Amino acid sequence: MKKITDILKYSTKAACPLLAVLLVAVYVPGVQAQDFSGLIERGEAAGIDRDRLERLVERAQNQNYDDGQIRNLIEPAIKLAENNLPYNFVIQKSMEGLAKRVPAENVHRVLAEFERGVSRAAEIIDPWLEQEEVRESVEQEMAGRELDEAMSQMRNNLIQSSAQALQQNVNEASLNSFLNDVTRISGQRGVSVSSVASSVRVMADMPTSADNPDLSNEILLNAIKSGFSANQVQQLPAAMNAAQFFSQLPAEAIGRGINEQIDRGAPGRQVLENLFKGDIQGGPPGMIPPGLDGVPGRGDDERRGPPSDPPGGPPNGG
């Protein structure tokens, strides 16, 4: 085969500029990567590591993505970075989509939805973080660190968690209500904003959220008030699922049992341990949470005995 330069000379002499362009596109190595240099520089200027973007382009080209598909792959992250919004999750999802060979259209849809979710979440989180009570909580939690850096990290964490929650069909009104309740208790005591972010992240996974999102908010708020760590909050959905499996009780009953344990002062570690064992109330085996034996609500006063006094007598009616 003739060298590419010889072919171009021949095509030019033959007055076929279109053929020359086509040959360049087909035969010149790296021309596609050069096409994206401007976009990569734009991302780098917005704070994204250049190598990450170049790796994305290279992997997409290896999977025969066309120019438009590659742009759709990297532009959402660049737009977020340019607007001072968290973008790492978008790049991560892009890489995962390529690794799993998800169709380009599906990857783009997920990225576009998350980009919109992040933008919407920022409109909720930014005003909330500006409140004096919340800022003071961040200062207490991040004592010893530079405040602006701490606030930036917490903001990104909260925005990403909120975006994921909204994408998982958590109602905006429910999210706002939860954050307003957190503000209220922040004025009474110091709260862990990291635990707040974890609460938002697991909100959609709580077994009670589908039918009773208000109860999910109540459980998470009580967990924050009682000092659950961020990691303990993240374990709540799995612990509730385990408790529901072992007890065969409705999710709402599990949630009420959690609130009962927290109200009695059980620490997060103990609450989780009880739930993973199927112990809803943190009492002796067979103890049933108030309101589960045909009586609606949280139960009558006579059903609120101490852990050593199971409602309705000893377990199994013995």
Image (tube, rainbow, N blue to C red):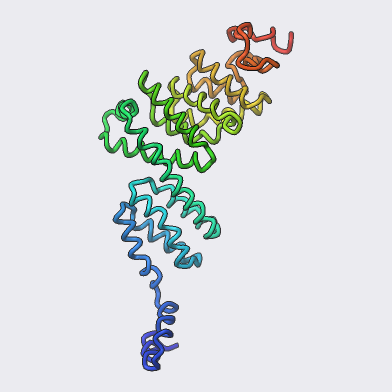
Q: From this viewpoint, which residue is outermost toward the front?
A: 173
At 48% from the left edge and 41% from the top edge, which residue is drawn?
A: 164
Up/down of 62 relative to 164, above or below: below
Residue 79 percent across, percent down from the top left:
37, 53
Snapshot quadrant of residue 229? top left
Up/down of 300 relative to 71, above or below: above
Residue 19 percent across, percent down from the top left:
43, 85
Residue 232 percent across, percent down from the top left:
48, 28
Q: Relative to residue 104, is residue 153 drawn left or right?
A: left
Up/down of 58 relative to 91, above or below: below
Up/down of 122 relative to 267, above or below: below
Along the viewing direction, whichever of 179 and 107 lies nearer the viewer = 179
Residue 226 percent across, percent down from the top left:
45, 20
At 34% from the left edge and 49% from the top edge, which residue is drawn?
A: 83
Q: Relative to residue 64, is residue 2 drawn left or right?
A: left
Q: Relative to residue 279, is residue 129 drawn left or right?
A: left
> Where's the N terminus, which quadrant?
bottom left
Q: From this viewpoint, which residue is outermost toward the bottom?
A: 14
Along the viewing direction, whichever of 95 and 291 lies nearer the viewer = 291
Snapshot quadrant of residue 132? top left
Total marks shown come to: 0
Q: Relative to residue 243, is residue 176 drawn left or right?
A: left
At 53% from the left edge and 29% from the top edge, which residue is drawn?
A: 236
> Where's the C terminus, which quadrant?
top right
At 48% from the left edge and 66% from the top edge, which residue is drawn?
A: 62
